[in-house]
Image (cartoon, grey):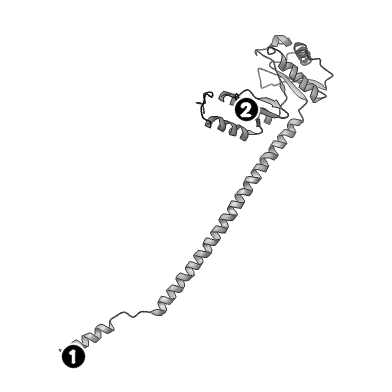
C-alpha cells in the first residue's frame, strides 16, 4: 500500500503543467509590438486630422475667394452697361417708334435730354407683352439724372403718357442689367414678401433694406439672398411682419 501511494504521489507531481517562459516572453514581445504599432497609427491619425483641418480651412478660403472673384466678374460685366437704360411695358409697332417713346418719356418727366449715344429697339419675339427701347447715354451722370427725373414724378408713367398701346398699366424705366444681375434683382424682389422694402439698383449692385432698421443689404450673389432670407425667417417675432411663409 505504501509503495502504491508513493507511485501515485510521484505521478501527481509529474502531471502539473510546466510554465513556458519562452512562449510568454514571445507573447509579451508581440503585444508590445502591437502597442507600438497602435501608437504609431494614433499619431498618424492625429497628423491626418490636423492636415484635414488645414485642408478644410484652405478649401473655405478658396471658396470665399472664388465667390468674390465671381462677384467682381459680374460687376465688371455690369459696368459695361452702366450708361444704359431700358424703357419697357409695350410692344413696338412701327419703325422709329422707339425714338418717339424716348422723346415722350423725356417730355412726361421734364427731362431735358442731351445728345445721347444711341437709341435702338429691342424686340423680344418670345415675349408677347413687351419689347424695350435701349437708350445709351454719353455720360453715366446723364443716365442717373434721367432715372432721377423718372422716379421724381408723382405717379408712374402709363402707356398714354408716352403715346403707345399696351396691355400693361405702367411703363417701366430701369437700368439695363446683365442676365445674371437681373436674375439676382428678381430674387431680391421676392424678399419683399418677407417684409422688406423693394430693392434698388446702385453702382452695379442690388440693394435692399430692412423696413424698420433701414439697414442696407448688398445683394452680391444668390448666397447673400439666402443669408438675408435666413435672418428674416429666424428672427424673433416682436411685432414684425408675418413670416409664416418661412
Badge 2 marks a residue whose secondary structure is helix
Q: Is residue 136 visible?
A: no
Residue drawn where x is 78% and y is 25% of the image: 83
Q: With 200 as the anchor, is 18 left or right in this view?
A: left
Q: Which mark is residue 41?
A: none
Residue drawn where x is 80% and y is 24% of the image: 141
Which residue bears the numbered disc 1?
A: 3
Q: Is residue 43 above or below residue 85?
A: below
Residue in front for this viewpoint, 183 or 130: 183
Badge 1 marks a residue whose secondary structure is helix
Which residue bears the numbered disc 2?
A: 188
> Badge 2 local density, few (<14 within 10 Å), some, or many (20+)?
many
User: In the picture, which quadrant includes the N terminus?
Assistant: bottom left
Among the 4 quarters of the image, the one containing residue 64: top right
> Badge 1 local density, few (<14 within 10 Å), some, or many (20+)?
few
Among the 4 quarters of the image, the one containing residue 94: top right
Residue in front for this viewpoint, 20 or 218: 218
Counting from the top left corner in percent of width and height, residue 199 is at: 65, 25
Amino acid at each position: 500500500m505504501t509503495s502504491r501511494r508513493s507511485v501515485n504521489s510521484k505521478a501527481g507531481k509529474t502531471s502539473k503543467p510546466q510554465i513556458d517562459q519562452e512562449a510568454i516572453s514571445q507573447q509579451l514581445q508581440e503585444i508590445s509590438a502591437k502597442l507600438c504599432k497602435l501608437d504609431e497609427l494614433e499619431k498618424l491619425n492625429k497628423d491626418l486630422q490636423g492636415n484635414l483641418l488645414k485642408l478644410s480651412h484652405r478649401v473655405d478660403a478658396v471658396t470665399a475667394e472664388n465667390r468674390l472673384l465671381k462677384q467682381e466678374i459680374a460687376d465688371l460685366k455690369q459696368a459695361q452697361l452702366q450708361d444704359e437704360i431700358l424703357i419697357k411695358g409695350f410692344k413696338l409697332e412701327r419703325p422709329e417708334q422707339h425714338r418717339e417713346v424716348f422723346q415722350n418719356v423725356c417730355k412726361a418727366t421734364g427731362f431735358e435730354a442731351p445728345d445721347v449715344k444711341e437709341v435702338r429697339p429691342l424686340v423680344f419675339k418670345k415675349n408677347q407683352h413687351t419689347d424695350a427701347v435701349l437708350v445709351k447715354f454719353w455720360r453715366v451722370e446723364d443716365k442717373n439724372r434721367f432715372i432721377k427725373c423718372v422716379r421724381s414724378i408723382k405717379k408712374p408713367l402709363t402707356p398714354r403718357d408716352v403715346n403707345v398701346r399696351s396691355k400693361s398699366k405702367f411703363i417701366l424705366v430701369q437700368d439695363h442689367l446683365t442676365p445674371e444681375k437681373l436674375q439676382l434683382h428678381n430674387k431680391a424682389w421676392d424678399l419683399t414678401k418677407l417684409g422688406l422694402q423693394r430693392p434698388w439698383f446702385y453702382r452695379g449692385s442690388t440693394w435692399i433694406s430692412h423696413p424698420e432698421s433701414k439697414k442696407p443689404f448688398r445683394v452680391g450673389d444668390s448666397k447673400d439672398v439666402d443669408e438675408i432670407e435666413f435672418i428674416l425667417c429666424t428672427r424673433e417675432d416682436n411685432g414684425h411682419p408675418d413670416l409664416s411663409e418661412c
